[in-house]
Image (cartoon, rainbow, N blue to C red):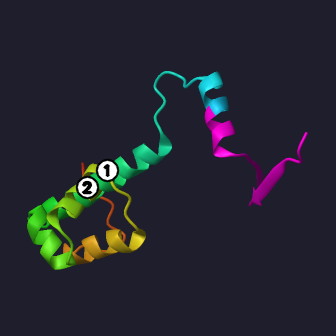
Amino acid sequence: MSQIQTIKLGKAEYVILPKAEYLRLQSVAGVPDGSVDAVDYARNSIGATLKAAREHAGLTQAELGVRLKKSQPMVSGAELGSISVSERYARAVLKACKLPADWTGPKRDGKR
């Protein structure tokens, strides 16, 4: 048996294993009903916030793309969550939409 590799982040210790083994274990364990992939969820959530920022500013995807010097398909992909975006990109979107850096979405019922 090979030595188990671990990494400690804060007080939690994590096991490092090859991706193929992770996928094998995942398929054996199954996925509980109602579960979602965390990466997909994060991309979709960030994308929805980016779209809300653009719409709040009254911009089209093409107009935002011009301000960011990015293509309209890139803006669309970011909003759909089909591509990963950096924190730098998200900050640039908020700046282009004239929103504060800590903006998290439109106000609802007097709250954000």
Q: Residue at x 46, y 25 (%)?
A: 34
Crowd class of label 2 (few under 14; some 14 to 19; many from 20; radius 10 Å): some
Residue 83 picture quarter: bottom left
Give the side of residue 63 with respect to residue 28, left or right: left
Q: Residue at x 41, y 44 (%)?
A: 41
Residue 29 picture quarter: top right
Q: Which mark is residue 2?
A: none
Q: Which mark is residue 77?
A: 2
Q: Residue at x 37, y 70 (%)?
A: 102
**Residue 35 is one of the magenta-drawn residues:** no
Q: Which mark is residue 82?
A: 1
Residue at mark 2 to residue at mark 1: CA–CA distance: 5 Å
The image shows residue 87, relative to residue 111, as above or below, that is below
- In terms of depth relative to the viewer, which is nearer, 95 or 70? 70
Q: Position of residue 43 (x, y in %)?
A: 38, 51
The image shows residue 62, relative to residue 34, as above or below, that is below
Q: Quadrant of the N terminus?
A: top right
The image shows residue 25, relative to residue 70, as above or below, that is above
Report the amino acid beneath label 2: Gly
Q: How many labels were placed on the picture?
A: 2
Give the side of residue 33 with respect to residue 28, left or right: left
> Does the CB distance between marks 2 and 1 fall below 8 Å?
yes
Region rendered in magenta: 1-23
Q: Residue at x 47, y 39 (%)?
A: 37
Q: Position of residue 35 (x, y in %)?
A: 49, 30
